[in-house]
Image (cartoon, rainbow, N blue to C red):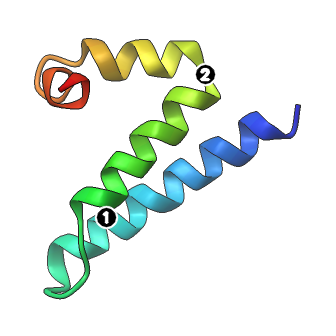
Amino acid sequence: MLQRPLLKSLGALFVAIGLVGIVVPLLPTTIFFILAASCFARSSPELERRIMEHPRFGPTVRA
């Protein structure tokens, strides 16, 4: 049961690193958002559904 909070925390950390990567030139951004989406999807079926049904990012994540 500790796995879900850990995955959610990792997802939030990867989002934060990705946001920093938008401003810092040599820090990759995309891979951290992909890792965050993966962590969130594994932590909760509800979050996975929200990611996949998102009008803007859902098709890109599915591809």
- Could you say whether the residue bearing mark 2 is in a helix, strand or loop? loop
Q: Which mark is residue 29?
A: none
Kindly identify which residue carries mark 2: 44
Mark before the other along the chain sequence, 1 or 2? 1
Kindly identify which residue carries mark 1: 18
Give the quarter of the figure containing the N terminus.
Answer: top right
Residue 16 position (above or below residue 55): below
In this image, 30 relative to 1: left or right?
A: left
Kindly indicate the quadrant of the structure image that contains residue 4: top right
Where is residue 60? Give x, y as percent: 15, 30
**Which amino acid is tagged 1?**
Gly
Where is residue 35? Give x, y as percent: 42, 50
Which residue occupies 45% across, 59% down? 14
Task: Residue at the far front: name it.
Answer: 63
Residue 26 position (above or below residue 59): below
Give the class, few, some or many, for how many residues have Cα within 10 Å of label 2's Cα (few <14, many ≥20): some
**Which amino acid is tagged 2?**
Ser
